[in-house]
Amino acid sequence: MMLRTVLRNEWRLLRADRALALVLGVFALLFAYALSNGLAWVDFQEETLAAAREGNAERVGNLEAELQRIADGGQPSSPFRDPRSPSVLGGAPGAQTAVLDPGPLTALAVGQSDLLPYYYDVSIRTNESTFLQNGEIENPLNLLVGRFDLAFVVVYLLPLLILALSFNVLSGEREQGTLALTLAQPVSARGVVGAKLAFRAILVMGLALGVSLLGVLFSGGFGSPGRVALWCATVAAYALFWFTLAAWVNGLGRSSAWNATVLVGAWLLLVVVLPAGVNITAGLLHPLPSRVEMITAQREASNEAVNQRSELLARYLEDHPELAGGVAADEANRAALAWAATDAVNRRLEEVTSVHDERLGAQRTLVRRYRFLSPALLTQEALLDAAGTGDARFARFQSQVREFSERWQTFFVPAILTGELMSVDVLPTLPSFRFVDEQVQEVRARAVIPLAALGGLLVLVGAGAVVRLRRVTGP
Amino acid sequence: MSTEAVLDTPATGEAPPIPVRAAELEDPILEARSLVKRYGDIEAVAGLDLSIQPGEVYCLLGPNGAGKTTTIHLFLGFIEPDSGRVRVSGFDVAQNALDARRRLAYVPEQVMLYRNLSGLENLQYFAALGGRETLSSERLTEILVDVGLPLPAVGRRVAEYSKGMRQKVGIAIAVAKDAEALLLDEPTSGLDPKASREFSELIETLRGRGVAVLMATHDLFRAKESGTRIGIMRHGRLVTELSTGEIGHADLERIYLDHMQE
């Protein structure tokens, strides 16, 4: 009964207070803008992928037509681009486009999908450097600050809205003098504060979850109810954390100005300083090798390989004796020599990129270890994972592309070494790529840890709030 | 000073145990025993014993800092006593604050309301919090008008109210609660003479219904007019208790001033 009474009164107060209505209106606009940004990004990504697929189909179509023409007695259009040659059919002219479709909730959280490649043209030239490049050109400032998407609004701005609505939930009553009449009634300060915060939580979560569900609706993400539920649970837990923090600070019995200062300080510390500190520490302790170093290594290996092609081919065949039968290790088999050089460059690159991968792994381990310091880090991780734009899904995509690249090379390299010519009949037997997406159970299993940690923080702060508010018996 | 009785109130000491709910119907509605409240070295209430029966209007007189408001806050459970017990309708305030408050209505010296809401909306809110959520808007409007708020002001924002109008809304909140006991802290502060007179009549009505009233005031005239008993407090102690039926205004003023000069 008390809850209903307070909710009704809070609604009246909200309607009567233009400033509060204005704050809510501004945030509703921010949410809408963030959603439209996310939807625009998904449109862009889908258009890009459609163009990439179209280019791939056109490429394969041209090769097929030329192979058919040759089979019918025609001549290759160029002796250097004879599609029967396995190094042409398996190389750039016949490259297969491996595509990662947008995650089910990408419209809500762009994450690193604007930074990490979401398609690769896989050929026998694909090597480690392929995975370190992004084919799309993007405004570096956009990449630096990240997209203004719903995940950004939830992680960074939602706490500010919650604090703006809740910093004086009890101190304001005390300062305007209404607490005396309130606590003269058979209600506890804890109950009143809880009911007032419940009203704000309904508003804020209604806004955040409502816009999220609209985004899911517009982007067709209801096909992944598990991810939607995970998103909603994360948003709710994060919002409740800030509400309980506001309750706890109010329970300390200080002025509204003091509450505001402390809560904004907490926001700065937990949302800005700690995450930045963890990232900077990770970068300092495990610095990534420079790209210049990597490119230089690639060039040096490439030059060296070109100069020693015959030796490299002999060494390659020593390593792969099963391919040695029928291979002519002389200048006449240029394709075989070229492949030996490519393989040598790839090995050298693997050495360099393994250092990069190792340090990146160390950085991620460190960030994972210290993410528990900040609810913002935990929330961001869970939201990106729910949206399918987190590290895990990209790593899965790259891993499958690597595996596909190996299958592609395994298919073509023996033919390159033996100088075998291919026909149009080989096209249906070519390896193909289809991304096998992660199951929602895997996502859920990963999300348990950040969500449990967020829940733990919530319980801890909530217990503090209850203890403090129990002590408030008078104005 | 025929009925004057100086109370022998111990300054400190453990109060005897009190059951949570008293059994006898004739028990006082408001009762304090050996009540002590200290703020640092200062004893705001120093061993107060007080007992107010149904239909009794007890006026606490005393200078600023005498402990009147602290006594009221102790009855409301806003603050905890250092020792002693406070009971409302038999409920120990320390153990059952909410049960005690359910039986209490309170009008503070400065009635502060939600400025952006109307007087009626404020009354609806506080009445509902007090357990009277079933009262209709019409009935609440009647109560507001009965305590002297002009009808056109009922729906206006409280931000436009004078102090006296806010005070009337505070009194209306107390009336709407229909409580067994009424705690009044300088309730006529800010009221004009006519409203003060109406307030006295209201107190008389409530007294007739068996409500126990504890009123802290500086207003000797109002205390004499409305009260059935008067207690004079000084330095946290109840130094004198008088029955208003047996003294005149002049006697009261003289007794009061005598005690203030001691």
Image (cartoon, coloured by chain):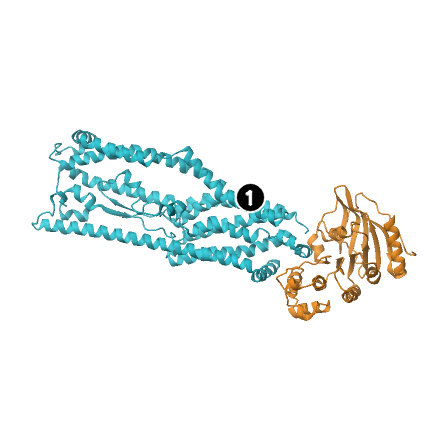
Label 1 environment density (alpha carbons within 10 Å; few <14, some 14–19, many ≥20): some
What percent of the width, then of the height, locates residue A132?
A: 31, 40
Q: Name the residue under label 1.
A: A460
Left or right of residue A440, residue B181 in this image: right
- Residue type at numbered disc 1: Leu
Left or right of residue A220, residue B73 in this image: right
Left or right of residue A268, residue A111 in this image: left
The letter of the orange chain is B
Label 1: which secondary element: helix
The letter of the cyan chain is A
List the single residue furthest toward the right: B2
Question: From where the camera sits, is residue A317 visible?
Answer: no
Q: Nearer the viewer, residue B181 or B193?
A: B193
List the single residue furthest toward the left: A73
In this view, A344 is above or below A463: above
Question: From where the camera sits, is residue B189 visible?
Answer: yes
Q: Which of A223 and A153 is in front in this view?
A: A153
